[in-house]
Amino acid sequence: MLTKRPIKNIIHCRSIRQEGSPPLPSPPQEISMPTFSGKRPSAIAYRLAHPRCIDSLVRNIMSLAQMFDPTDTGCYVVVWRGIEEDDSIMWSPAVGVAVGKVAPEKMAKYARLAQEKAERLAANPEHIASFQTRDETDPANPKYPGAVRMDLDHIIISCSGFDWKFDEMVGIEIGLFLRLISVERVRDLMALSSNEHAERRYAKHN
């Protein structure tokens, strides 16, 4: 059974990269960090929770997206985590990061869409991507691709702001860097959505 926690532990922050920045400070104690089994949890949770890590990885994909649409100058990324409790998984948003430069009203829209994608994927535990519940027939309530489920922990990474194929790649990029997603899952995602941009970038994993 899937249960959703109230949204209360989400980190909202606008990322800023600066050359020569000092070492990252320790995350505040009160922030609820994702948990990771079998992989130096403090180091990975530290990276994932700190916006500068996500900022750098997202900008890798943003540079590709801008080759096809120069107006893709920013996005919103959310990370949802699930915690096993008895016979259910309790899902809640853990991290929310705005990346790049986008008008405030657009960023609010991107944040809403990114949350919807993650929540929809969490509600379908047998799915590995929000692509599987894609439905754009209702303009007032579109259901876009762009969220992917990691297979090494109860983690969902969702992005909104680019073409959906690049939104999806954000989750793959972060997952591969933090070793939260297996090569097999990356292959499954590419086969599922026929994402030609992902196939080119991650061809070495085939």
Image: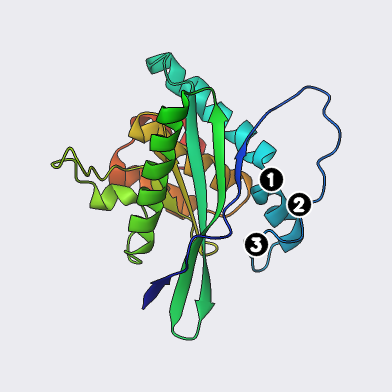
To which residue does mark 2 refer? 27
Residue 74 placement, left or right of 177: left
Secondary structure of the residue carrying tag 1 is: loop
Q: Which of the two residues, 13 or 61, is positioned nearer the viewer here? A: 13
Taking the spot 29% from the left edge, 38% from the top edge, the residue there is 194
Taking the spot 33% from the left edge, 66% from the top edge, the residue there is 126
What numbered label is drawn on residue 50? 1
* Residues tagged 3 and 1 counted as in contact (Cβ below 8 A): no
What numbered label is drawn on residue 32? 3
Q: Is residue 94 above or below residue 106?
A: below
Q: Is residue 70 above or below residue 43?
A: above
- Give the residue type at disc 1: His
* Residues tagged 1 and 2 counted as in contact (Cβ below 8 A): yes
Taking the spot 64% from the left edge, 68% from the top edge, the residue there is 37
* Label 2 Cα neighbours within 10 Å, binned few <14 / some 14-19 / many ≥20: some
- Give the residue type at disc 2: Pro
